[in-house]
Amino acid sequence: MRRTAVLGSAGTLLAGALIAGAIAAPAATAEGRHHGDSAAYGATVAAERAAKKGIDWQDCPADWALEKPIQCGWVSVPLDYAKPNGRQIKIAVDRIGNTGSTSERQGALIYNPGGPGGSGMAFPRRVVTKNAIWADAAKAYDFVGFDPRGVGHSSPISCVDPQEFVKAPKLDPVPHSEADKRAQRKLAAEYADGCKERSGWMLPQMTTPNTARDLDVIRAALGEKKLNYLGVSYGTYLGAVYGTLFPSHVRRMIVDSVVNPSKEKIWYEANLDQDIAFEGRFLDWKKWVAQNDATFHIGTTADKVQRNYDKLRAAAKKAPFGGLVGPAELDGLFQSAAYYDSSWVPVASTWSKYLAGDTQALVDAAAPDLSDIQGNIASENGNAVYTAVECTDAQWPTSWQKWDRDNTRLNRDYPFLTWGNAWLNLPCATWGVKQQTPVEVKTGKGLPPVLITQSTRDAATPYAGAVELHKRFKGSRLITEQDAGSHGITNLTNPCINDRVKSYLLTGALDSRDVTCGPHATPKP
């Protein structure tokens, strides 16, 4: 799950004939029991069609920034799985072949980086850039990425003009009056209206179960009998829903930094849980900044660092830096430090430069680049998909009193993210299309052991989510990274985790019991 008060961040086979047994008959799919036969039947029809058609792999379009030998293609899926012969949309996919021998090859590994709204198309570049963590897995697997429905090249949706979307400075997320709250409520309602106006034809079908069905159609189009899958952040929820709907279609599944799959948490409560976890991780970073005061000169204790952050926000509110960076933009920059350890040094260094008189460094780091048209289109699209999926997936409170009460209470003890997170999600309170009931995530017949990885201090997907999915997926194994909090840990250097992920992918082997690993290395200034 990605989160930002302003905007941010919370990401094969040659086409062949259908392998015998690749597609289950409608009556045999778990989805038939979960969601009624119409969508299950539609998913089966679409998968059979895709298996026969395959994927016409070509060099990627030049403006996709995916170098050879990565190849790109398209998979057609129904907009509405209850109407498999109705309107179709195209899902963009890419791949790079396995680097080992034909005998070493174990199929395709499909990746989703999260969001909702993240593109997985950069995944094959881990092979091109010779990412050492994934080198052995790349010998055995084609690395496959895709743009989920509504994202990027896959019938992208939009809620507002991209250049308007990135304009800054935004309103201060922290309200200081009822008038401030009314202004934010107005913006949220207008955003929801904009989504329906610009993308209403697609919104009712922008759900996690539909994306899971798309994933199964991609699997079939690749000629794969079973799915090998790596999902991070929201990609873990996509994996959990896929594993529930298509348990017998899973071969290997790794879920990293886990969304709590409980129906009660999707999605309102999950966002409240984030507010608490982000406060804890922001504190971790402030302590680290204080420990490295000789380098950064920001404050010698976490409390002093916080007081200086409050001063920085107040200065930005009084006169936005560069005319563009107000409190909202600052919160967006500093959230990245609570998300990823890799941001600890850059964010602290930028702040340190500001305190030494270099305001431009702060503007460069936190302000939108209004000249980056393609980047702004991607940012707006990512936020539109995030909103559309979370708002359509589940019922949200419609009472402003409930939102106000819950967030006022949380903000007292967890002020770093609470109100920014509330405004980001408030369009769901006035959402213009029918909201669904989340899937009851559970172990179905044929689901193999799933590997779960999670750090204990993760802010975007708190640790309890991994425990909950572990409980629901019988036979799964949980690798806990103790005393760490980076979001997405399978792509970080920690041999205790890396070796187990590699072993699972190459042999299917898992430890006989859950494992606790020490933390990866703390960043050094």
Image (cartoon, rainbow, N blue to C red):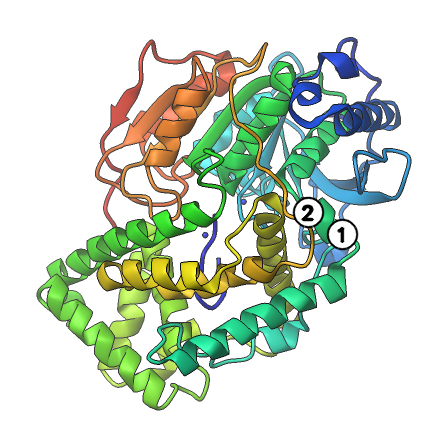
Q: Which type of secondary structure does the marked residue at label 1 adopt?
A: loop
Instruction: Please give the name of the residue rendered at 22% of the width and 31% of the height, measured from the top-left corner.
Output: 518
Give the structural element (helix, strand or loop) at label 2: loop
Q: Name the residue nearer the viewer: 70 or 83.
A: 83
Query: Are the residues at dot 2 and dot 1 in contact (C-beta closer than 8 Å)?
Result: yes
Residue that mark 1 sits on: 202
The one nearer the camera, 174 or 20, is: 174
Give the image location of residue 509, x and y in percent.
Answer: 43, 11
The answer to whether residue 123 is above or below residue 499 is below
256 displayed left or right of 311: right
Callout 1 crowding tier (Cα within 10 Å): few <14, some 14–19, many ≥20: some
Q: Is residue 76 left or right of residue 394?
A: right
Quadrant of the rendered image containing residue 494: top left
The residue beneath circle 2 is 206
Residue in the image at 57% along x and 39% along y: 112
Q: Which mark is residue 134?
A: none
